[in-house]
Image (spheres, helix red, strand yellow):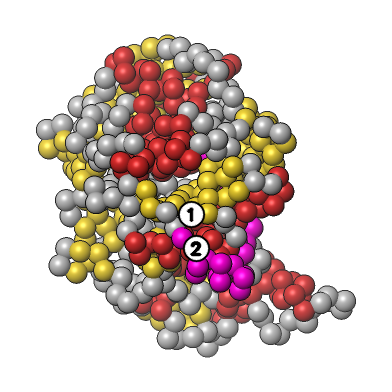
Amino acid sequence: MNTWVYIDHFKGNALPASWEAVGVGKTLGNVTALVFGSGIEALAKAAFEYGADEVLLADEAALADYRAEAYATTLSKLSAERTPDLLLFPTTTRGRELAGMVAIDLRTGVMVDVTSLEATGDKITVTRPIYAGKLLTKETCSSRPQIITLRGRAFPKPAQQAGKSGTLTKVDAATGDFPTKVEGYNTSEGGVSLTDASVIVSGGRGVSNNPALTPPAGLDEKQAEIWRAQQGFALVKDLASVLGAAVGASRATVDAGYVPYIHQVGQTGKVVSPDVYIACGISGAIQHLAGMRTSKVIVAINKDPEAPIFKLARYGVVGDLFQIIPALTAAFKKKTGK
Amino acid sequence: MKIVVCIKQVPDSTAKVVVEQGKVSWGDAPLIMNPWDEYAVEAALQQKEALGGSVTAVTIGDESTKETLKRALAMGADGAILICDPALVNMDTQATAQVLAAAIQKTGGVDMAFFGRQAIDGDAGLVPVQTARLLGWPALTLASVIKIEGSNVRVERGVEEGRQIVTAKLPAVFSLTKDFGEPRYPSFMGIRKASRAEIPTWSLAKLGIAAPASVIAWPEIMNPPSREVTCEFITGSSPEEIAETLANKILAEKVL
């Protein structure tokens, strides 16, 4: 099968799910990687090293910033000319929206956020979670090309083979008047991205209201509540930092204004699948469990032994998390030498 | 400003959703407005309040989905349209987008179309961009801040690396994230107004389009494999001892 893989990147740094997609493409046949941007030859080289046989490189100042319309038009034009059988995208913000737009241009469908797939001849049957993972569905597409976005961390990342090369083909960006302009970025909310993280430490209501703390004088009730929550989340962040982990949060803490939405795990937040998920003071509402149930090893720390989170957990601690979390941070600090 | 907000009715997010005899069941859980669409309605109402104009809520479904349109009316939308046709079943995202794009065009003179970022049932998150593509409008998705000046729009949108700030021209499609701000509750007056509202129904014939063909099929829907885990509770005489044991157990999993 002639498979194209869109390499999603930010300023030349590929998102890991792009390489996972190259790995999936290689299991189906030849892979052509699509590398769009400006000053990104190094990324084309990396695409070969992760397994691409060919790279279509559109390296132009006009593509310096990702703009959905300009990128989608370029991709659709190339696809119409060269007729690949299958287009793979990582399920990232950009990958998802490009897949959707290109599908409209090419009059085909998208199988989105796929976690496994099998090919019979040129027909691919995928499996993907719906209802935030409460259910799974199989999907097929009757039109061509087939377009699939692959969930990050659902497929193995191929090994990088230093020095491996392939056929580099330079292509032009589509010309046209694309009125969307990128003014800049605010990356201060960044940090370790939840969907890429191999370890996540999450906090819930339980870490937000330590009764033993006395807020500084002069705070009103709401401010005191937020101050308490911030003290609790500081413990979660300390543990995350020792583990190189991303910080997650339950919906309750986000809705209460303790933590920005970017951290929310669950049905109306991010669906995550890390190697280790440490849930601190999270009881395990069904919407939260839907968002993290495929994590490999789940650890729950909670004062309530009946909390539903323990039904998914490999390890559990029933106790005072204001004592357990700092002790765990100290223990990992000692053991990992950080 | 002529504003359209596209919404969907879904099972409540707290519902226990299972497959029974090959069909999706959510028991007696209520059907609600897709939680992400509430932010879209809020954003639409805020733009109307700032700039004047009207907000029309649109959904595709059967008679029962009028309840969700009524919620949008109760929140403050000025009008609602139900797109209802026996041919509109088992639609994939591009077919849905074709219907919504046709409805936006038929409405005429629309400056802004708002969507939630995705629906919590299908989780595709494609309909906003696909509708924008069909209309030939900019897709300003995952917006948390929207500023309009004349026909110029400036949006902060969530991407993996933080926020991207983009500008574009109206008309445009927007999808909203939770960062936009809490959606309002329906007012008492709004609920009364919504209960009396006559909601027009548009068929495909009225929209002037043939039933769009879906190309995605769902041959099987399954319950996920159950997680066979037994929780091993770690105990000890002190937090330090518990932490020590737990850290060793996690490290022994060799996943760190």
Residue B7: x, y in percent?
46, 54
Name the quadrant of the C terminus of chain A.
bottom right
- Residue B53 is marked as none
Residue B188 on the magenta segment: yes
**What chain does badge 2 belong to?**
B
Residue located 57% across and 45% down the image? B3
Is A120 situated left or right of A153 in this image? left
**Residue count near mark 1 (Cα–Cα under 10 Å), binned few <14, some 14–19, many ≥20:** many
- Residue B80 is marked as 1
How far apart are the two marked residues, 1 and 2, measured between alpha carbons?
A: 9 Å
Which residue is under mark 2? B197
Vertical arrangement, residue A259 with respect to residue B243, above or below: above
Residue located 71% across and 34% down the image? B150
- Place residue B78 in its image quadrant: bottom right
Is A138 situated left or right of A279 in this image? left
In the foreground, A243 or B119: B119
Assess whether mark 2 and mark 1 are in contact (beta carbons under 8 angstroms): yes
Of helix, strand and loop, which one carries label 2?
Answer: loop
What range is drawn magenta here? B173-198
Is A324 situated left or right of A226 in this image? left
Residue type at mark 1: give it: Ala
Residues at discs 1 and 2 both on one chain? yes
